[in-house]
Amino acid sequence: MCCRHSHYRTDFNDVKGQQHVKRALEVAAAGGYNVILVGPPGSEKTMLAKRLPTILPNHTLTEALDTTKIHSVVGLLNGAPIVATRPFRSPHHTISDAGLVGGGTMPKPGEVSLAHNGVLFLDELPEFKRNVLEVMRQPLEDGDITVSRAMGSIRFPAGFMLIAAMNPCPCGFLSDPQKECVCTPLQIQRYRSRVSGPLLDRIDIQVEVPALRYQDLASKDAGEPSSTIRQRVNAARSLQLARFEKTKLHANAQMGAREIKRYCAVKADAEKLLEIAINRLGLSARAYSRVLKVSRTIADLAGSEEIQSAHVAEAIQYRSLDRRM
């Protein structure tokens, strides 16, 4: 049963250009993946991120009730009887680890729990304190967070999609064709190293967001609306629900090693692409699994039972930080 009263004030047809980024977010929504957007200031990273909830499947009644309970605990309902839309939380980079994952003398849910069944957006990712980012590993893996205090431990739900954004370098213009980057290679390396490898491995889709061209800004063509994209996402999610009918899984992003082996087999030509990616990009075992899972979702969006080489090639393109580092 769906929550029928959901309505968003934003829409993907507001976004000019950036077709490949929209496609990446569609894949992310279809499979429930975490995303990082890398691009210069003014490339609409935040605008794109804010529209991700509009293409996610509608809240089910159970999800809406669960989300409402969490928001009620911290007094965020503002008189609303139910949270009908998927949450979008965007904490500032100065947030503490307790503010992010929960805590206090009487433990309360943090931002990761307030984003449960929705989206957690971390803008300027390298500006967050490292210890704050590292505490996200548990909720990213498990879908919940345990807060321990002297009085005992309490577990909060934290099943969110993470979307992060960052500049390619400290000045932000490394990939901008119009403005010259003034950063040294050492400064760029230090900037990127603020985000640990293990955390990046948990982000399934990494995509570059280029500066907008004049043609895109001046275009009067309306982009594809969120409702149309959501129809494709719903179709792909339906395939996944059928696939995992007898399990506790509901999206491809949740697959473990056993499910990957069963549902993500690829043919010889696609296997060759994966071998090249591993050897040239130095992908970790975790990143390799991420590519296979994303390939499965791209195939689902295409209505294909088999994972083709084109699906694998697109999934590899979504490891842009691996290609740059």
Image (spheres, rainbow, N blue to C red):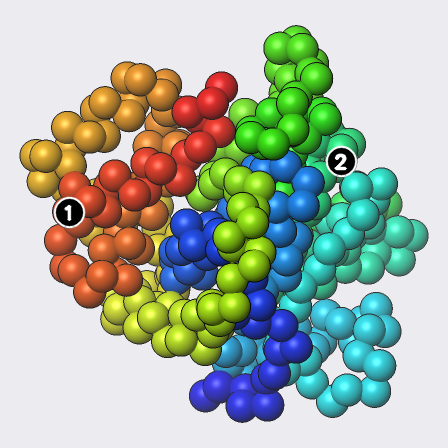
Instruction: Give residue 189's quadrant in the image.
Output: top right
Along the line of sight, which residue is nearer the eye, 325 or 69?
325
Label 1 secondary element: loop
For disc 1, the neighbor class at 10 Å (few under 14, some 14 to 19, many from 20) is many
Give the residue type at disc 2.
Answer: Phe
Q: Is residue 168 above or below residue 121?
A: above
Q: How many marks?
A: 2
Instruction: Give the residue type that dot 1 points to.
Output: Gln
From the image, tell me which residue sits under label 1. Answer: 308
* Disc number placed over residue 128 in the picture, else none: 2
The residue depicted at 70 percent of the width and 17 percent of the height is 182
The one nearer the camera, 150 or 30, is 30
Most extreme residue toward the right, as rendered? 105
Q: Secondary structure at mark 2?
A: loop
Whether residue 300 is visible to the viewer of this picture, yes or no, is yes
Query: Sequence order check: which comes first, mark 2 or mark 1?
Result: 2
Q: Quadrant of residue 86?
A: bottom right
Percent coordinates x, y for residue 82 in the rendering: 69, 85
Who is closer to the viewer here, 297 or 223? 223
Q: Residue at point 89% right, 57% down?
A: 106
User: Does any portion of residue 55 appear in the rendered image?
Assistant: no
Question: Label 2: how many residues lie within 10 Å, few (<14), some (14-19) or many (20+)?
Answer: some
Q: Residue at x 77, y 59 (%)?
A: 109
20 shown above or below 40: below
Whole-percent x, y for residue 12 in the image = 53, 67
Q: Quadrant of the N terminus?
A: bottom left
Image spot of residue 26 (x, y percent): 42, 60
